[in-house]
């Protein structure tokens, strides 16, 4: 064992290190992501049944989903969902809420300004920078190419 | 039936993300930004609408739906307000989600403490 050279060691460690369970991960991402989206559809249909217009339905659905994502993260439930669902839990808007609350809670001891308020945007910051920035560019382009 | 469609479309989008996660060194944060940008571009080209129409919440709940709303809002803003609309439209369309996430995110982070991992 002690005569392994670097290459052999690499082979050895590759064999021993756990392979990601591709198929299982894909199935779980599909199930968890699907369930969250189907639940979003339940909210949409409920708000529609209250007689809200399309814009209000969209806004209300976002608010309810991010609220649920945030509170489930606070309760420690969303991290468990994330462990099972991987991208299925990360990509829906609830996962975005999770990405905000998690680091904010974690860094609370650094204070309410540089801890909570600053760390909230560890992931949300890039999302908002790229999202809002590119949306303005899209708007400007549409102005340029308007018929 | 629309629940099945939402389930299938949303699940499928998440599977794409999972495949990227498992086969690259990208983190979930990279995936979020990438999918958001894909949504922005697809929204700008108007090719997200058919997916949205078919999938309902399956297309609007994933982060690419957020990107789509942003760019759709900017284009809409230009139509109604011209140049200023390009700057206001995106956030206007997504204001509810952004404000909600900031307020609830802050409150929950204050109320709760991280759970110790076992």
Image (cartoon, helix red, strand yellow):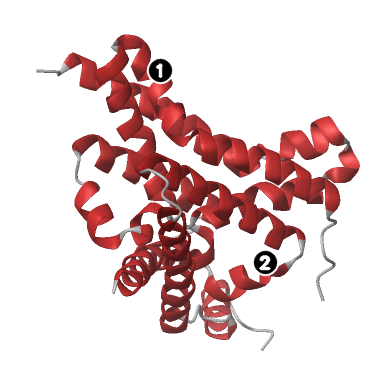
Of the 4 image quadrants, the one containing the N terminus of chain B is bottom left
Q: Residue at x 19, y 37 (%)?
A: B45
Q: Position of residue B80 (x, y in %)?
A: 28, 17
What is the crowding at mark 2: few (fewer than 14 residues within 10 Å), some, or many (at least 20)?
Answer: many
**Taking A86 as reference, is B102 above or below it?**
above
Local crowd size for mark 1, using a 10 Å CA cut-off: few (<14), some (14–19), many (≥20): many
Q: Give coordinates of residue A87: x percent, y percent.
A: 49, 64
Residue at figure coordinates x 70%, y 50% from the top left: A101
Numbered disc 2: secondary structure:
helix
Question: In the image shown, does B76 or A29 lie closer to the viewer?
Answer: B76
Q: Which numbered tag is attached to residue B73?
A: none
> In the rendered structure, the residue with mark 2 lies on which chain?
A
Question: In this rendering, which labeled residue sits more in front, label 2 or label 1?
Answer: 1
- Dot 1 corresponds to which residue? B87
| Whether marks 2 and 1 lie on the same chain | no
A81 sits left or right of B104 in the view: left
| A18 on left or right of B2 | right
Whether B31 is drawn above or below B67: the answer is below
Say whether marks 2 and 1 touch (CB < 8 Å).
no
Quadrant of the image occupied by residue B24: bottom left
Residue B90 picture location, percent across and down: 40, 28
SS class of the residue under badge 1?
Answer: helix
Q: CA distance from mark 2 to mark 1?
A: 35 Å
Q: Nearer the viewer, residue A49 or B113?
A: A49
Q: Say whether residue B35 is visible.
A: no
Q: Chain of mark 1?
A: B
Residue A108 in view, yes or no:
yes
Give the total of numbered labels: 2
Q: Quadrant of residue B72?
A: top left
Quadrant for the C terminus of chain B in the image: bottom right
- Left or right placement of residue A59 versus residue B100 in this view: left
Identify the residue under disc 2: A79
């Amino acid at each position: 064992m002690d005569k392994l050279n670097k290459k052999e060691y690499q082979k050895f460690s590759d064999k021993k290190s756990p392979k990601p369970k591709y198929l299982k991960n894909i199935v779980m991402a599909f199930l968890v992501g699907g369930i969250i989206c189907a639940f979003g559809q339940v909210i949409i249909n409920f708000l529609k049944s209250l007689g809200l217009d399309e814009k209000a339905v969209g806004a209300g659905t976002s608010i309810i989903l991010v609220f649920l994502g945030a509170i489930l993260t606070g309760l420690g439930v969303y991290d468990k969902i994330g462990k099972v669902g991987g991208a299925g839990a990360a990509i829906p808007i609830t996962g975005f809420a999770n990405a905000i609350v998690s680091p904010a809670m974690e860094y609370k001891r650094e204070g309410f300004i540089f801890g909570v308020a600053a760390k909230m945007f560890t992931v949300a910051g890039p999302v908002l920078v790229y999202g809002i920035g590119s949306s303005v560019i899209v708007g400007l382009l549409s102005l340029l190419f308007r018929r | 039936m629309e629940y099945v469609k939402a389930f299938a479309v949303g699940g499928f989008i998440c599977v794409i993300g999972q495949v990227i996660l498992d086969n690259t060194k990208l983190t979930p944060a990279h995936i979020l930004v990438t999918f958001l940008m894909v949504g922005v571009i697809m929204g700008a080209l108007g090719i997200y609408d058919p997916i949205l129409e078919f999938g309902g919440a399956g297309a609007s709940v994933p982060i690419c739906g957020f990107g789509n709303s942003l760019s759709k809002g900017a284009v809409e803003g230009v139509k109604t307000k011209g140049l200023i609309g390009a700057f206001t439209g995106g956030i206007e369309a997504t204001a509810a989600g952004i404000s909600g996430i900031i307020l609830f995110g802050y409150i929950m982070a204050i109320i709760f403490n991280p759970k110790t991992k076992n």
